Amino acid sequence: MRLADRSSNSIAILLCTMQGQRFLREQLDSIVRQTHRNWTIWVSDDGSNDDTHTILSEYRTNLGDSRLFVHSGPSDGFAANFLSLACKAGVSADFYAFADQDDVWEVDKLALALNWLQTVPSHLPALYCGRTRIVDAKNQDIGFSPLFTKPPCFANALVENIAGGNTMMFNNAARRFLCKAGPEVKVVSHDWWTYLIVAGCGGRVFYDLTPMVRYRQHDTNLIGFKSSWSASMTRLRMLFYGRFQHWNDINLEALKTMRQHLTPENKFALDEFLKARNSPFIARQIRLRRSGIHRQTVLGNIGLFVASIFKKL
């Protein structure tokens, strides 16, 4: 894809840290190397007592105090930390990009996301996300995140998150909906919530097949990548132990506060899904079909059907 000159568009990079000294320099260096130059970094630190603050101070000195800002996080988990930044008064830009403390960005990451986001009218919520390249602690290639080919939509977002927050960039229209929900909304993860909100409120979501983030796997990852077989077994265990159902409980409760902002089609999908979860078997299957919910893969949809049989949705 040819990258257009979008140098006038400002991007606020929303970076959350917690005991980040081990890999933080590499992530910051990869941001500094971006071909798109009009960015600022907003850091929310959730109580680090290692050298994270020393590293941030060094980069703030080098970049200037108008390009890197550091604030204290809410100390309520990673999702709350990211949402606190996304909704923070005083953070202002044309676009916003979530950033993890331990990844490495390809040099065109911001430019490529911006290239698509600028095709969406500014009044429409827009979310760019994508696949990642998986690397180890030494930044050596391991593989790739799953390749999803079905179009992103709310009926998919209800039961699956297709992309990590470390790939996400969104516009002000999307941010306004996140702010309506508020930074204290209880959700499973900030990225899944962002996908739900943008897709549900009539926005556009683009899933890029080109990996632009080197997603680092190491022994202190909060959320890590697993091989396809390992991931399938993990999801199966989570299903039978009720984890998937618990996650749905959390997200669906949060969505109640945003129901009035959903499109009519997505309100219908949400209502049918809610009713299906507590319906007898036949009615459950009918309502699930009406809702249109689905996952991206054949195995994922088989798992979804199994979950519906055992009332684990």
Image: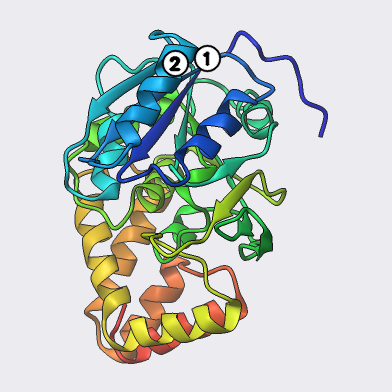
User: Quarter of the image holding residue 293?
Assistant: bottom left
Q: Are marks 2 and 1 in contact (CB under 8 Å)?
A: yes
Vertical comparison of 240 with 79: above or below: below
User: Quarter of the image holding residue 150?
Assistant: bottom right
Outermost residue toward the right? 2
Residue located beneath label 2 in the image: 93
- The type of residue carrying mark 1 is Ser
The quadrant the C terminus occupies is bottom left
x 34%, y 43%: residue: 262
x 33%, y 66%: residue: 272
Q: Viewed as shown, does residue 232 lie left or right of 190?
A: right
Vertical comparison of 73 with 93: above or below: below
Q: Position of residue 217 (x, y in %)?
A: 51, 61
- The type of residue carrying mark 2 is Ala
Q: Position of residue 78 (x, y in %)?
A: 29, 48
Residue located beneath label 1 in the image: 10
Tell me which numbered mark, 2 or 1, is placed earlier along the sequence: 1
Q: Position of residue 308 (x, y in %)?
A: 36, 84
Q: Viewed as shown, does residue 224 lie left or right of 129?
A: left
Q: Is residue 301 visible?
A: no
The secondary structure type at the circle numbered 2 is loop
Q: Residues within 10 Å of mark 1 (few under 14, many from 20)?
A: some
x 48%, y 62%: residue: 218
Q: CA distance from mark 2 to mark 1?
A: 5 Å
Q: Is residue 285 visible?
A: yes
The quadrant the N terminus occupies is top right
